Structure formats: C-alpha cells, structure tokens
Amino acid sequence: MRFRCRNLRSLDSGEFEYVRVNQDGSVRELSPKEKEYLNTEFSVGDGAAPYIKFSYKSRDGWGSISGFLPREKVPTNIVIEPVNPQYDSLVANRPIEYFKEQILEEHRISGDIIETHPDGSVTCTPNPNISRKERFKIMQRARLER
C-alpha cells in the first residue's frame, strides 16, 4: 500500500478552524452564521449536525465534494477565498418555498408522482417504473448540477 502525503496548512492564530469547500472544488472562509452553526452542540446522530469532511477530496452520500473542512486539511496549493460579506443575508432572504421547490424539482426529474393536498402539504411517491438505484442516480445528478 502506498500513501501520498500532501503539504497541508497550519492553523494561524485568529483563524477559524473550518472553511467551506464548494462543489467546484474552490474553498472559502465561513460566514458568521456558518461559524455559529459549527459552534452549536449537537447530539450524536442528529441529522441537523453539519457535515464535516474528512479530507479535501472526500464526498458525501450524494457524491458532492462540498462541505465543511478543517482548515489544516486544505492542500497548500488551494487558495482560501474570502466569503461574500452579504452571504448570510442573501441566503436568509430566500423564502422557504425556494428550497421546497428545489427538492420537488429533483422528484419531478426522477419521475416521482407528486400530489399536492388542499392543506398545502405534498406527497411524493417514488417512480414505480425505475429501480431505487436508478432513481437515486437521477436525483443525485440533479442535486450535483444544482
């Protein structure tokens, strides 16, 4: 077995311990809300806990490279960009319908049966004409493209 060792960063005083890896592989500093989120205590197994990457190249269950990464694990050849100072307000100003629509779009793309009820709730039934594996791949591709 062969191991490759990359030059990694050291943590300078005053720097936040984590950074954000974007889907395109770029890395940026965290916004104040993201720092607050990472400083929140979560129970083991809590689904709301942040995804912390093990290494720069590690991927989540959807195959996405994006996620929070300890600063010291960012290869030295990768530039850590500043965060847009308006990032938190830009995200906060998106209505919840925006996020709901993105999720529903993934279901539509996979051919799921979507029922909207009079009370506004929605039921998604998996597409019966494709396997769970195919459905996952379609939804994964849609999420990664987004």
Image (cartoon, rainbow, N blue to C red):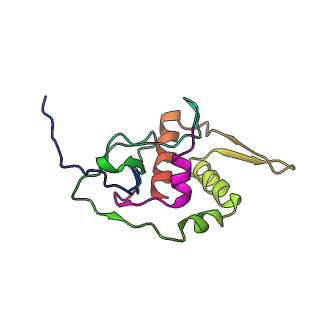
Question: In front here: 37 or 15?
Answer: 15
Identify the image quadrant of the N terminus.
top left
Residue occupying image coordinates x 54% and y 29%: 44
Does residue 86 lie above or below 3 as drawn? below
Confirm whether the magenta stretch covers residue 38: yes
Residue occupying image coordinates x 18% and y 46%: 6
Confirm whether the magenta stretch covers residue 26: yes
- Answer left or right for 129 relative to 76: right
Q: What is the span of residues highlighted in magenta in the rendered image?
A: 22-41
Name the spot of residue 104 as percent of width and height, x first: 64, 52
Question: In front here: 146 or 75?
Answer: 75
Name the spot of residue 87 as percent of width and height, x first: 53, 67
Q: Residue furthest left?
A: 2
Name the spot of residue 111 as percent of width and height, x first: 60, 47
Does residue 127 lie above or below 91 as drawn? above
Question: In front here: 130 or 97?
Answer: 97
